[in-house]
Amino acid sequence: MIDLCNQEPVPLLSVDAALARIKAAICPITESETVDLKNALGRVLSESLYSPINIPYEKNAAMDGYAFSSQDINHEQPFTLTLAGISWAGRPFEGHLQPGQCIRIFTGAVLPHQADSVVMQEHVRAEGEAIHFSAGTPAGQHIREVGEDIKQGGLLCGHSKKLTATDLGLLASAGIYELAVKRPVKIAFFSTGDELTALGQPLASGKIYDSNRYLLSGLLTDACYSVTDLGVIADNKQMLEDSFISAAKIHDVIITTGGASVGDADYVKEILDRCGDVNFWKIAIKPGKPLAFGKIGSCYFFGLPGNPVAVIVTFQFIVAPALKQISGVPDLKRLQITATCTTNLKKSLGRQEYQRGILSQDKNGDFFVASSGKQGSNILSSISRANCYMILPAECANLQAGDKVKVELMLGAEII
């Protein structure tokens, strides 16, 4: 079976070729700004960060117990040491540990310079100030050495790292409270189409509610992005062109939905040809063939299809990698796994398809995937139920239950 939508006078650009063109055309943002650590989550570092201190800063105990010097003991014999004091977390023992002495110590508390060992409190017997240790008591254990985690001057987080909550904890442990990050990518988006009706308004005949702007608003929720919703622009050439030109002056990226196809009222490509540069238009993807990429001045432009499922698919596989590149995030390989398909899948030759599925894992760790339902590019209910895409190459035809298929999780989804 041949995909009739793939019958073009010029062969459609493959997904990989489209991604390669986008990658070659994009220059990452270089401008930076300084932010407080508490506001740095999800931001991209402009420079590598190195630790100004050793972590740990001082030698300390890894658990509650008793600290002593291994020079005072014979490991093969029971021994008794005299309790000289206590070292609390935040209140170190201030005396000098003499031969034959030990101290009570708590997790995270500083060890006296003379001590090199900690024994768990459960492994000793205390009688007043006499602390009895059994034969075979190990030496040199349960100690956190100075700089064991990070040495002073050691790398904390590298240039272009997108900071996670864990990274914030690491940086805080080094005393870093402000840092330089890439400025946010300024993104404008809008929907096109006379058929679109705002939420809260009654639907007239021939009208539909504008779901795409709500999709994009959610998909663009990222600390690296500064996003402006420009609303709905009617199918009017001059209004569209004016909107493109004005938005391009103050944004890094424009994303539109609708108007990129070949109908009489689809003006996006025509306007782009007139006021910008079209890198490509139409790619061999399903859903999402009428996708345009180009520039208006220094502003990148993505013209996505009007069908909502096509918007979601093309965003994850085409737009999201481009936005990461613009924001300065390194090109990372996305996680894809192989799963056994448990339902029959219809597939025509010619375009790479992203069918929506439900991925699960059994108790043996094996992955299985089933279709989430109808696969039309207007069917939001099946993509709402789904947690993954089944990626079917252009040369692939129908699949039968039991066949293996490559799968990628949807953004923010989890395996059931």
Image (tube, helix red, strand yellow):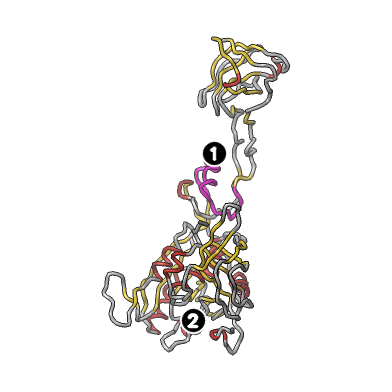
Residue 93, percent from left and from top? 55, 19
- Lateral position of residue 388 relative to residue 232, left or right: right
Does the magenta-highlighted stretch encompass residue 391? no
Name the residue that disc number 2 marks.
Answer: 272
Residue 272, percent from left and from top? 49, 81
In the image, residue 174 sits, relative to residue 115, either above or below, namely: below
Q: Residues within 10 Å of mark 1 (few under 14, many from 20)?
A: some
For the residue labelled by badge 2, is the local secondary structure a helix, a strand or a loop? helix
Name the residue that disc number 1 marks.
Answer: 173
The magenta segment is: 157-179
- Considering depth in this image, is 239 or 416 the residue closer to the camera? 416
Determine the residue positioned at 51% across, 63% down.
Answer: 358
- Lateral position of residue 120 relative to residue 252, left or right: right
- Considering depth in this image, is 255 or 368 the residue closer to the camera? 368
- Lateral position of residue 208 relative to residue 90, left or right: left
Determine the residue positioned at 32% across, 79% down.
Answer: 207
In the image, residue 16 sits, relative to residue 4, either above or below, namely: above
- Lateral position of residue 382 relative to residue 332, left or right: left
Res. 254 visible in picture: no
In the image, residue 410 sits, relative to residue 265, either above or below, namely: above
Q: Which mark is residue 30?
A: none
Query: Which badge, 2 or 1, is on the more N-terminal residue?
Result: 1
Amino acid on which disc 2 is placed: Leu
Amino acid on which disc 1 is placed: Ser
Residue 287, percent from left and from top? 51, 76
